[in-house]
Amino acid sequence: MTPVVLIPGMMCDARMWGDVPQALAPRPVHHALPVTGKTIADMARAILQDAPDRFALAGLSKGGIVAMEILRQAPDRVERLALLDTNPLAEAPEMQARRAPQIDRVMAGGLEDVMRTEMMPNYLADPSDTATLDLCMAMARTLGPEVFQRQSLALRDRPDQCATLARFTGPALVLMGEQDRPCPRDRHELMHRLMPHSRFVIVPDAGHLPPLEQPDATITALKDWLDQ
């Protein structure tokens, strides 16, 4: 049974996947954190060093961006690809310009403030879901300011991966929360066009984190993808 490599979003760890790993049992699940290096390419290479020889690959948000780079570096090792709430494009100049001030605030002790005021308000369809917001903050605290800095720089300087996706012919899933603000629908429609054989799933009543907001719908989509 082909193992699954799961890559979480920015300032998230394996907890971001919620019930997904248990639901995929007995399929082996390999949790990969994109925390090593200062570029997307560095992070992909570090994950590939520890990954199984051949695997199904799923990434959410920043994890999806790293997953696309893994696909670019080692296409023969990726059996199937799931991209959740992510973006295949290079970072827009206006977002690039916001990175340095954010990093400065975080490195000066403002990690919790940046997470709570600038990032987490965009995460969820239901902003009153304090349990999920508390989990997001707990994951960010665990990873710490240095990881925030590395991940921010990697996102700022990331390459466009449209050509990478256009070359992929394996089973593919493009999934998004219906109310995802950081990665809007047009990005997902683009990925679906680049991989016309992919399945495009929109999860109702979810924002940027469907595995935590709507786990049943997310798990169903991932199981369907693995059964293709």
Image (cartoon, rainbow, N blue to C red):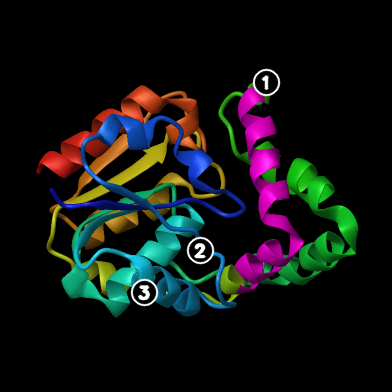
Residues under numbered marks 3 and 2 in contact, where contact means CB atoms less than 8 Å apart? no
User: Which quarter of the figure has residue 165?
Assistant: bottom left
Left or right: 199 with respect to 134?
left
Which mark, residue 34? Answer: 2
- Residue at 43 percent across and 34 percent down: it is 211
Counting residues from the start of the chain, the first of labels 2 and 1 encountered is 2
Location of residue 186 with respect to 134 vertically, above or below:
below
Q: Quadrant of residue 185?
A: top left
Extent of the magenta region: 131-153
Disc 3 and disc 1: Cα gap in Å?
Answer: 40 Å
Mark 3: few, some, or many residues within 10 Å (few <14, many ≥20)?
A: few
Amino acid under disc 3? Gln
Which is closer to the viewer, label 2 or label 1?
A: 2
* Numbered label tally: 3
Residue 137 among magenta residues: yes
| Residue 110 position within the rendered picture, expressed as x and y whole percent measured from the top left | 86, 54
Q: Main secondary structure of the magenta part?
A: helix
Mark 2 surroundings: few (<14), some (14-19) or many (≥20) residues within 10 A: many
Q: Is residue 59 magenta?
A: no
SS for tag 1?
Answer: loop
Looking at marks 3 and 1 on the same chain, the residue that comes earlier in the sequence is marked by 3
Q: Is residue 213 left or right of residue 119?
A: left
Residue 88 appears in the picture as rendered: no
Q: Horizontal and vertical percent for residue 67?
A: 37, 63
**What residue is disc 1 on?**
128
Which of the two residues, 28 or 186, is positioned nearer the viewer here? 28
Q: Amino acid at mark 1?
A: Ser
User: Which residue is depicted at the point 70% across and 40% down?
Assistant: 137
The kind of residue tagged 2 is: Pro
Q: Is residue 128 visible?
A: yes
